[in-house]
Structures are given as structure tokens and as C-alpha cells.
Image (cartoon, grey):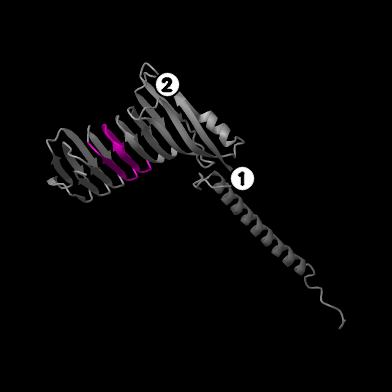
Amino acid sequence: MRGRKPAGYPGLGVAIGLTVLVVLVSAFAGYAIVYRARMALAHVRPSTAPLRAGSSVQQYHISRQYALPASIREIDIVIPAGSITITGAPSIHKVAINGVYRASTAKGLSAARQFSNNWHVSADSSKRIMTLAMKQPIDVRFPSPRFDVSIVVPKNVALKIQSANADTTVSDLAGQVQVASTNGSVVVHRVEGAVTLSTVNGNVSDDVASVEGNVSMTSVNGSISFDIKGRPSLKMVAKTMGVVDGNVHWVRRGPHLMSAELGKGRYQATLSTRNGNIDVEASEG
């Protein structure tokens, strides 16, 4: 009897082993559930990654010309995202565009096909308007297409530009210019006609050789810069929570409101921003 082992609990080791195994399996299952949940959230989260070179993003280079009917007096341009440069040229009767369209090919469509599907050009002789528009569907799963474009138009046409996320530059036009953006700067050089420039997040700048129409420059989060040459006849009102500066004689009209007058004050200039400074420089050069 001395060499005999006590009966005890012969299944104790097996039970402990099974318990440890169950705990490990449960922990692994819990980790797997958390991992799948995180991956699911990552899958549905809207992409904010910028477009970049790679197999999923293509570039399509565009160079086209469109004849301008004699009846057209205004050109409307709609570019949702990218950059826009417009230049006026004398003695031409066409619209010339050169640019690069960048788009994700994750849907199985090439950048060239997407451009062809979404780029529309039309002319309405009754309204005397030609329209160049990029109709861009929104899909949060992929980066938005971007169109960086330079456009040459006749110098004397009126121009209207709309964008959501684009920097815009307009130069050397004699007609009326309207630019409306949401996120992006608006810069105008040597435009002789009336100008209406607005953005929400971005700076607005206008330098002119002469003022031949009313001026409106508006931002919410950005500065306003107005550089005037010659001998303008202009009444100006500046409104901002920031600083109003420049070499003109400003008169305070309220806590955040200033006014100034150049010459006989024939035209009106309204300069407005909420979070930004306003600067006006006038010279005879």
C-alpha cells in the first residue's frame, strides 16, 4: 500500500488545460471581432487622402479649342476642384483649353473616359452664353477628380466662374468678371470691367490699371488686397474684424467699418471679410 498513489482527482490536469484553452479561444475571438469592427469603420470612412501618383490614379492631358459663335457675350465656367487660370486675348474668336485631369480608376473607368463623361460644352445663342462645365459626381469612397486647367478667351467677353475647391486666377479682360469659390484663393490682374469676387476660405486679390465698374471682394476666412493704378473715381467701404490698412485716407464709420473716397467717387467698391485684413494701395503708376 505504501507504493500506491492516492486516487485523488485524476481529471484535474485535463480540466485546467481545457479552461486555459477556452480562455485563449475567447480572447482571440474577442480580438477578431474588434479587428473586424475597426476594419469595417475604416472601410466606410470617407477618404480624405490627396490624389497622388500610383496605379489607382491616372492623368489625362487635354488640349482643345472651341469656336465661339458671334452671338456669345458671356462664358460660364464650372470646375469643382483643381486650379483655374483664365487669360483674355485680343482678336480671337475661340476658347482654348489646356490642362491635366486627374482621377481615380478604382471604379474601372480610365481618367480619359471619366473626363469625356463629365465635361460638357454648350452654347445658348438666345442667352448669348457659352458654358464649359465639369459635372463631378461625389463618391466618398474615392478621392475626388481634379482638373488643373488654363483657358484663353476673347478679351471682351464677360466671365463667370464657379468652383468648390480651386484656386482661380483671371487676367487681361475688359468685360465683367464674377468668381465664386468655397475653398480657394481668387486673384485678378488687369480686369477693366466690373468685378465680383467671393470665397469662403481663401484670400482675394485684385490689381487694376483703371477702375471702369463697381467692385465687390468678399471672403470669410482670408485677406482682401486691392491695388489700384491710375486716377480712379471710387467710393470704398471696408468691413472686417481684422485690420484695414493701405495708403488711402480711411474714415471710421463703425467698430468694424471704414470708408474712403478716391476722385469723384463714380464707382462703388465693397471689401468685406470676417477673419482677415484689408489692404488698399492706390498709385498713379
The residue that mark 2 highlights is 123
Q: Nearer the viewer, residue 181 or 48?
A: 181
- Whether the magenta-drawn stretch holds residue 241 is answered as no
Dot 2 falls on a residue whose secondary structure is: strand
Dot 1 falls on a residue whose secondary structure is: loop
How far is mark 1 from mark 2, CA to CA? 37 Å
* Mark nearer the viewer, 1 or 2: 2
Q: Quadrant of the N terminus?
A: bottom right
Residue 27, how many percent across, how many down? Answer: 64, 59
Horizontally, residue 95 falls left or right of residue 118, namely left
Residue at (14% x, 35% y) in the render: 265
Please give the range of residues in magenta.
182-210
The residue that mark 1 highlights is 55
Q: Nearer the viewer, residue 44 or 26?
A: 44
Horizontally, residue 119 falls left or right of residue 201, namely right
Q: Nearer the viewer, residue 170 or 223?
A: 170
Q: Is residue 56 above or below residue 71?
A: below
Residue 107, how many percent across, how many down? Answer: 59, 37
Q: Residues within 10 Å of mark 1 (few under 14, many from 20)?
A: few
Task: Look at label 2 and name its amino acid.
Answer: Ala
